Amino acid sequence: MANVTKKLLDSVETCVDDMLEGLVAVNPGLRLLAGHRVVLREDWEDVRANKVAVVSGGGSGHEPAYHGFVGSGLLTAAVPGNIFASPPPDDVLAALRAVTGPAGAIVLVTNYTGDRLTFGIAVERARAEGLQVEMVCIGEDCAVSSKDKTAGRRGLAGTVFVQKIAGALSEEGKSLAEIVETVKNTISSMGTMGVCLSPCSVPGSGPMFQVPQDTIELGLGVHGEAGVGRMKMDTAEKVVETVLNHMTNPDNTSRIEVKKGDSVALLVNNLGSTAYLELYIIARDAIKYLETRGVSVERTYVGPFVTSQEMAGMSLTLLRLDDTRRRCLDAQTTAHAWFPMCPSPSTGTLRTTRTRVQLSTDTQQAATVIAGATKVDKDTAQQIFHVVSAVCNSLMTAEEQLNDLDRACGDGDCGSTLAKGAKAILSALGSADMPGLPCQTPAVLLQEMATIVERSMGGASGGLYSLFLTAGAQSVMTSVTPASWTAALKAGVASIIRYGGADPGDRTMLDPLHAATEVLKALHEETADTMATLQKAVEAAESSAQRTATMAARAGRASYVSTDRLTRPDPGAQAVAIWMRAIYSSLGK
């Protein structure tokens, strides 16, 4: 425990919930939704009845984002996850059920795979319940120069500008379509880039990475992902010049277009532990740089907006202004973290501890249950039980192997995340004599497993596997044959492509899945040898997973990492090969 960073907490395990209770305790205009991690503005029922709701969220640890920006003229609801982790779709769906009325809701999500997937799942479920919901991904990172589909430009501190503009338009009574259009135009007129002097850490752990004493990391992500380069420690003026030169460089594919005569808003964001002494010097240098080039800096915001725990560093955001954006940024808000304007709460100055919001039963909608799904005989159900058990045990055994592979391109937790899901499924599975999951009804089994992995794993992996299993369930609704299982695999792959944005060949879990699916097409022939075909499919998946070691990453977090560091198989792809081998071995017994 010697390397654990010191933090003033009551409990590592409950720190997010403890923080949210404190947030609401000192801000009379905020409420918590009972049973969920959802922060609501006090007049959320008025928004539901008359206006477009504005919902956002993401991992905790970036305070005051996102929950600090809940209030009139900004967010209607915020949905925080664990530290640096996406919130579960159930919480997002609860927020949408609470605040979405006839005018609809806009969901603002930062362009990280996990956030896109978990919020996407909730949005799809909300739409299935008849709610009018639109989701917009925010990605304004100027450091990332690739055009990769899944990773692309990360959502950084500029997210706050987008939230503020959407909230102001909602207060004006604009329609959902009008707000969506304005928000998308805003994102395309904005850019952000950050620098880091020292690392951050999550509660209960040590620093996530290291930055040499004489070095600055350029263009890092808000979760501690490696930046696009490093430079020697220099003056604030030189660092600002380096950042703004990169952001506006014509050769940079993710640049923001800023020319002489333009008017901009400048946001100087404290990434965590940077002193205001430094921030105001940075603001001065940035304004001087821009004005020297004929750019008018009409609005400047300085302070902590989107942080990364105790990281020392800052980010600069530029937004080209027009009349609408200027008006919306200037509009009043009761959100306490909007630094320039913090009016007294409408409820008065007397602080009281508020109870949590309890939704009425007609607002809470029950989950859909698959009716009439095909059942299999007892022997087949037993076989399915043993296959599921084998898959879970194989992933638990491979936990450290997969973590080791993930350290080169991610958080180093791929194996642990998959093991969490495997343990949760095994716990629910029960025993062969007394199964807890409906192995006799494969479609229902896959749906229940989808819910388990979504809740237990979280993040991108949980979202992808939940989508994979949910989509596959439809293919075994009316028949359970080798051909229908193949169709289920194909449907799951298609779902990952649709929501994850990656394709085969992008160095992800899709590569072995696609390779196996191509081989398993043979099972649609009545004369096909099932086990022989499955063996070939497993071998194809294993070969494909190994080939990812020499592939360029065009999707996911690995696409941010320098190519010369990606010399081993992708951990997600390797995991697929492992559990597919487990399926074959179990069936062959």
Image (cartoon, rainbow, N blue to C red):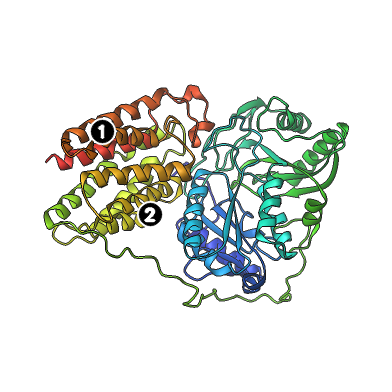
| Residue at 67% over, 47% down | 184
* Residue at (31% x, 33% y) in the render: 518
Marks counted in the figure total 2
Q: Does 465 sit above or below residue 408? A: below
How packed mark 1 is, by other alpha carbons closer than 10 Å (few <14, some 14-19, many 20 or more), is: many
Residue 473: give x, y in percent of width and height: 32, 53
Q: Position of residue 240 (x, y in %)?
A: 75, 33
Q: Residue furthest front?
A: 526
Which SS class for mark 2? Answer: helix
Q: Amino acid at mark 2?
A: Ser
Quarter of the image where the C terminus is located: top left
> Mark 1 or mark 2: which is in front?
1
Provide the residue designation for mark 2: 456
Quadrant of residue 258 within the rendered picture: top right
Q: Is residue 260 visible?
A: yes
Residue under the point 59% across and 40% down: 154
Which residue was labeled with disc 1? 537
What is the distance, in whole Å, between disc 1 and disc 2 at their CAs?
29 Å
Residue visible at 33% across and 53% down in the picture: 474
Along the horizontal axis of the image, is 553 left or right of 301? left
> Which residue is nearer to you in this view: 274 or 186?
186
Determine whether 232 is above or below 161 in the image.
above
Image quarter for residue 449?
A: bottom left
Instruction: Name the image quarter holding the N terminus.
Output: top left
- Residue 418: quarter of image: top left
